[in-house]
Image (cartoon, rainbow, N blue to C red):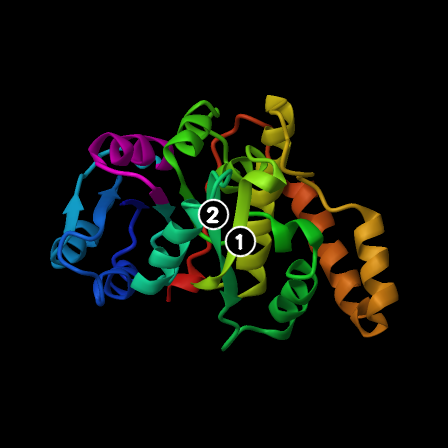
Amino acid sequence: MSIVIPAHNEAKVIGRLLHGLLDAAEPGEFDVVIVPNGCTDDTAAVARGFEGARVVESPEASKAVALRLGDEAAHGFPRFYVDADIELRTADVRALTSALERPGVLAAAPSRHLEMTGRPWSVRSYYRVWTRLPEVRAGLFGRGVVGVTEEGHARLAALPHLVADDLASSLAFAPAERTVVGEAAVVVHPPRTWGDLLRRRERAATGVDELEAADLDQAGGSARTGPGDLAAMVRREPALAPDVVLFLAVALIARGRRRRPGTVVWQRDESSRA
């Protein structure tokens, strides 16, 4: 299998990812391609320190270009696209690979663990709601990892580049064609500050607008959270009402700040990389 990791100024965290990925791997088991793109730090040097990882550098700071270069350098299937700021272990990749061998499954992602240590109450409150949303539970997005078969890869290759690339990847597959694998787990690091949370959500709101403007076939579900989802959540768990109010406030602020579809936006959260 091949693992493609685009990395822009990820020297602080890419060693953490590669240690977990490669620590228990057999020699030659994983074809790992790291693509440092437009880096001004030591991302490439850190990555080269890991045996079993190949580095393909790009001078252009572009995730789309990095993914393309990684695809060109990768050898095998299934193929995994992994964000540099998450944590994933050898055993998790093996479990995802097994899931992709099932008939009809074209795409897979691991279960999600959010590392909330040191996060303020506002960030914890937001994610208490976000993690309960039906599409968040079922979708492949927001995990920093997606694996595809060769057929699934062909479908992703036909998509336009979008800010919300992980959401587009999820919606490209019908529910029966994708799976979230409980035996695999990814550690995701949410923002450490209120401001970084808003920047993340602004980028997400821009990405949803781009996705809808592209008029893609959204076979996998809706890109937006409906009022009915939030109302049903409060009916089931009335204690979540204050969290839902904060969630709505974040959504309104993010939508008010979002950019026009097609505008280049990164709005990266730096606090989670501390």
The percent coordinates of residue 273 (x first, y second) are 38, 62
Name the residue at 59% across, 36% down: 171
Q: Is residue 179 left or right of residue 187?
A: right
Q: Amino acid at mark 1?
A: Val
Q: CA distance from mark 1 to mark 2?
A: 6 Å
Residue 87 forms part of the magenta stretch: no
Q: Closest to the observer: 198 or 102?
A: 102
Q: Quadrant of residue 130?
A: bottom right
Name the residue at 76% across, 55% down: 248
Q: Quadrant of residue 157?
A: top left
**Most prominent secondary structure in the magenta stretch?**
helix
For the magenta stretch, what is the residue range? 63-80
Of pointers 1 and 2, the one earlier in the residue sequence: 2
The percent coordinates of residue 93 (x first, y second) are 35, 56
Question: SS of the residue at dot 2?
Answer: strand
Task: Judge whether 2 appears above or below 234 on screen.
Answer: above
Question: SS of the residue at dot 1?
Answer: strand
Quadrant containing the C terminus is bottom left
Q: Closest to the observer: 34 or 150?
A: 150
- Marker disc for residue 108: 2
Name the residue at 37% across, 50% down: 97
- Marker disc for residue 180: 1
Q: Is residue 207 left or right of residue 16?
A: right
Q: Amino acid at mark 2?
A: Ala
Q: Closest to the observer: 253 or 124?
A: 124
Residue 78 forms part of the magenta stretch: yes
Dot 2 alpha-carbon crowd within 10 angstroms: few under 14, some 14 to 19, many 20 or more: many
Q: Residue furthest front?
A: 103
The percent coordinates of residue 96 (x first, y second) are 41, 53
